[in-house]
Amino acid sequence: MAKDYQPRMHSAEHMLNAAMDRKFKCGRCFSAHINKKKSKCDYKYKRGMTDEEAREIEMTLNAAISANLAVTEDLITLEEAEERFNLERLPEEVDSVRIIKIGDFDACPCIGEHVDSTSEIGEFNMVSHSYEDGILRIRYKLGAV
Ligand SMILES: [Zn+2]
């Protein structure tokens, strides 16, 4: 585990990806920069988002965060994982895959560190969204818990 790993920010990234893909069908972010104070996620999409859409994403996340969803992990076989998930980012040569579930909100293969409950994440605050060259970028902060 990297010294500067940020389980709260990273768990929020999982939730943001779920909300973004559900709303825009844009897939999960292809690049993320997770930092203690502010993080950013980049999505491939055909247009930028409106402020109204940004507020909607924020509200979706904050509703899920305040629902105190349990964050759990499941080990499933590689075969099963290939059927259910996009495994492009997995290292090869594995026989089982760790799936991180955030209540019913999200499920995603990941080897990172996560919170145990969404109540540990704090309020999700989208600082800005921008669009350039086919890339929709979201910057976010988390409130104190
Ligand atoms: Zn993760």
Image (spheres, grey):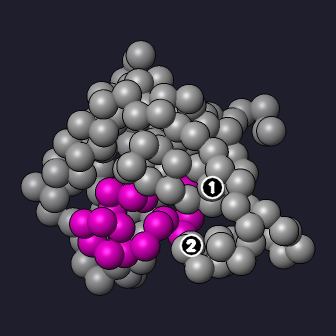
The circle drawn on residue 99 is: 1
The residue sitting at 56% across, 29% down in the picture is 116
Residue 102 position (above or below residue 21): above
Q: Which residue is drawn at 85% across and 68% down?
A: 94
Q: Does the magenta stretch include residue 56?
A: no
Residue 80 at x, y percent in the picture: 65, 73
Range covered by the magenta-colored residues: 16-33
Q: Which amino acid does label 2 sit on?
A: Phe
Of labels 1 and 2, earlier in sequence is 2
Q: Does the residue labelled 1 lie within 8 Å of ligand 1?
A: no
Q: In the visual, does 20 lie left or right of 74?
A: left
The answer, for residue 142, to whether it is visible in the render is: no
Badge 1 vs badge 2, beta-carbon distance below 8 Å? yes
Q: Where's the N terminus, which quadrant? A: top right
| Secondary element at tag 2 | loop
Question: Image point 71% across, 77% down: which residue?
Answer: 79
- Judge the density around disc 1: few (<14), some (14-19), many (≥20) Cα neighbours within 10 Å: some
Is 28 part of what is drawn in magenta? yes
x, y percentage for residue 47?
Answer: 25, 78
Type of the residue with mark 1:
Ile
Residue most extreme to the top: 145
Q: Quadrant of residue 75?
A: bottom right
- Vertical relation: 117 (above or below) 60: above
Q: Which mark is residue 82?
A: none
* Residue wearing tag 2: 85
